[in-house]
Image (cartoon, rainbow, N blue to C red):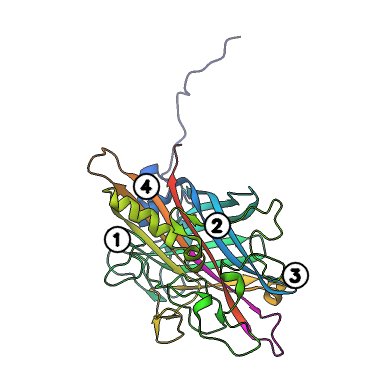
Amino acid sequence: MPIDTSLPKTLPKLTPHSIPDPQLRVPSVRKTPDNATVLDNLRLLADLAGTWKGTGFNLVARPDLEGKANLYLELNQTQETLEFKPISSAIPNRGFGMDDIELYGLTYLQQISDVVTGGALHIEPGIWVRQPATTAPPESPPSGDDIVFRMGSIPHGNAILAKGTAQKFTGPPTLPTSTAAYNGSIFPSFNSTPFAVNAPIFAPGTAEFNLPPPPPPAPAHGFTQYTITNPPTAANPRTPFGNVPAVPLPAEIDGVLIQDVVNDPITLLQEVVAQQQVDGFTFEGVALNITSQTPIVFGTTPNQATPTVTVAVPDGGGGIENIPFLQTNADSALVYATFWITTVSHPKRKESFLQLQYAQMVLLNFPILLAAPPKPNFSWPHITVGTLTRVFG
């Protein structure tokens, strides 16, 4: 028997659904808009979307009870993949002190390995988010800027929340200007020199070897692992001591002396930009400045704890959670970072390209193992930097 596919002669009577005015509240049912709207809603975060690959450097002082040393200084030339995927719908935050707000963001996955050994170094899933201005609490970025924050999960047993602002910049990123140590960054230092907990972060150009002599029994020139002329040994544990094979560090990386890289890893980012500037490239983009706490105190003179400057990060704040093992052995106390999303152009080239650079400082707190009791608690900088470009795909 043939199937009757004709429409019924009488359709049921339909009643219009009641659709509230979308301006009155954030809807409970969230539908995905078109792609252009998704990116528009991200505003200054939009150019993060995609997959980025590149190289960088990692420096971390680790506690070394097993080696009976104050620290093991790990130094890695790195290769990295960083992938961002836009979240296709709004993220509603419901209000008690003010009307509901909508957040917009991207998920990310960061994977870092050692260029020399191929060994795994870091994996971090997380989310970047743009927040609108609010009245409860009162938060309002300068005109044209955005409030942003990053949430990240680190498999050692940490979770970070770092908040701040996104703002446009022009000119070569990371290079000094008349008002900033690094164009686009609100932070005046990413120096690696360790210091007593709650003391100022040392100024750029500080070297452990050049610090004023500490009281005995500390070594006259500080922690010897930071001085490259001291070879890596059991008594001076530093990369590549303990690696198999023990491939030595190069004398320089991209033209930057390895001692300068150890003191201030951000010099690697500066070298990339300086060479591009010499080659005639121009720059404009967005800088993301985030921190887990504000304010932060920095030294202003190399190798000296004073004078200082206090940096209050606009709309900054957040926190770090550590599992009990880390709270006892290597407590992550602070994270701050600058990400530069840069459009790099050249007058002789038809198309520009996107470049992502970042410098991140994490302070790990643990006491000086070989000091006499009571052992002083120190902050040991863990610094990562990278220069990446967005890849085809």
> Which residue is label 4 attached to?
354
Residue 388 coordinates in the image, percent (x, y): 45, 49
Q: Nearer the viewer, residue 348 or 6?
A: 348
Q: State how far apart marks 1 and 3 are (Cα).
A: 46 Å
Residue type at the position of mark 4: Leu
Dot 2 alpha-carbon crowd within 10 angstroms: few under 14, some 14 to 19, many 20 or more? some
Which badge, 1 or 3, is on the more N-terminal residue?
3
Please indicate whether residue 325 sits to the left or right of residue 187 in the image: right
The boundaries of the magenta stretch are 360-377
Residue type at the position of mark 1: Phe
Q: Residue at x 55, y 60 (%)?
A: 58
Instruction: Identify the disc placed on residue 169.
Output: 1
Which badge, 1 or 2, is on the more N-terminal residue?
2
Is 19 within the magenta? no
Residue type at the position of mark 3: Gly
The residue mark sitting in front, 1 or 2, is 1
Tally the marks: 4
The residue mark sitting in front, 3 or 2, is 3
Q: State how far apart marks 3 and 2 are (Cα).
A: 34 Å
Q: Nearer the viewer, residue 379 or 137?
A: 379
Which badge, 1 or 4, is on the more N-terminal residue?
1
> Which residue is label 3 attached to?
67
Residue 178 coordinates in the image, percent (x, y): 26, 71
